[in-house]
Amino acid sequence: MAYLTRYVWAELSADERVSLMARPSDSSDAFEVAAKILSEVRAEGETAVRRYAQSLDGYAPEDFRVPVSELKAAADALDPEDAKAILAAADAVRRYHACQGYKSYCLETWPGGVAERRVTPLEVAGLYVPAGTAPLVSTLLMLAIPAQIAGVSRIAILTPPVGEGGPDRTILGAAGLLGLDEVYALGGAHGVAALGLGIAGLPRADRIFGPGNAYVAAAKALLAQSPGGAAADLPAGPSEVIIIADDSADPDFVALDLLAQAEHDRLAQVLLIAFSERFVDLVEAALKARLEGLPRRDIAAAALQVSKAFLVRNEADAVAAANAYAGEHLIIQTSDPEALCGEIRHAGSIFLGPWTPEAAGDYAAGPNHSLPTAGAARAYGGVSVEMFQKTTSVLRFEARGAAAIAPTVERLAALEGLDAHRLAMAARREKAEEGRL
């Protein structure tokens, strides 16, 4: 069986390129279901949350919040080497994100008129940490650490229970190691609704971060669109990678990088941009050899069924294809990856050279792995400290400042036909000029 269906980039029409780069879809009713759940949670409150928690998760404790003592116990129970790895990754992520953040500043824009930008953190950040087919401890690190650096007052973590046993112990342990004390054993669209609306003992989040299934994503999007609803972080769907590899690349490395994304989700998308049929043949052979030993072989194989290889004539075509895709992850394994990197305009995160697997970025390299998918990298970057902050402008004008700015404001207000605006400025100018202020 051939996994990489091949297409010659130069022979494809613009419409064919768009169609072939479209992300896989499960054609689910996610938005319809999420809208129903949100509506019921709004109307019934905790009763609806508990009903869905019991029916979908099989777990609805008296209090969804996990006791701090349980977080500490889970942290203490971690294998020492696991705890060491978590803390080492956390250190790299913290040092990378410490350089981020909006900056406050103040300047005189008019004589006697001062404009200031003030930076404040979110009051309540909600972090969704999946634990379905795999407990995503790395996602907890990527979301919680920027929130901590930003100075968020309250960090509320939502992680779905693993059946009747409650939340995943490794995620609880990692939360304990990071000094996080507010974790709720709740997931799905009902959990997002509870967090976005402040129901069932959960705080009302100002913004909700983190990946999830189609229903979680739909619930986040619907909340963000509703008046007073919690904002969302960024469009995040099934994981995806696009690899540019020339004939100098190691086909085994390329195959493993493709499989690393494919094993995430049956809807994950993996694409290869190559310069020769022979190289694609080598990658195909490596894929088949490596796939056999994977515990998540069935998931990876399902994702590979819709994978593609685009054959390009030159590096310009390779760059054009990568920019058209605007992928979550872009790996460049060519003889001069830095040169190609300079031409890339749209990618969530870029990995250069044979010794930089995307797996390093997923766990411990430092940059955030919560990234835009489905082409959203054309407009979004990954999660950052700035996303946990907001800015407020502050103006202070003296009488001489009002007099200085008034002619410009009055003229522009008249231009727009907004006379009360003009008068509000003119009245101050007149009094300032008379020395009555």
Image (cartoon, rainbow, N blue to C red):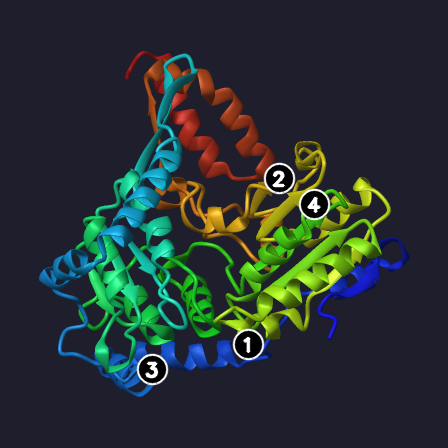
Look at discs 3 and 4 and give the one toward the viewer: 4
Q: Distance between the residues labelled 3 and 4?
A: 53 Å
Residue behind mark 4: 249
Residue behind mark 2: 353
Name which residue type carries label 4.
Ala
The answer to whether 291 appears left or right of 196 in the picture is: right
Residue behind mark 1: 298
In primary-sequence order, the first of circles 2 and 3 is 3
Look at discs 2 and 3 and give the one toward the viewer: 2
Name which residue type carries label 3.
Glu
Look at discs 3 and 1 and give the one toward the viewer: 1
Residue behind mark 3: 40
In primary-sequence order, the first of circles 4 and 1 is 4
Name which residue type carries label 1.
Asp
In primary-sequence order, the first of circles 3 and 4 is 3
In the rendered image, the vertical position of residue 394 relative to residue 171, given as above or below: above
> Which residue appears at 53% of the width and 33% of the height?
413
> Which residue appears at 64% of the width and 54% of the height?
252
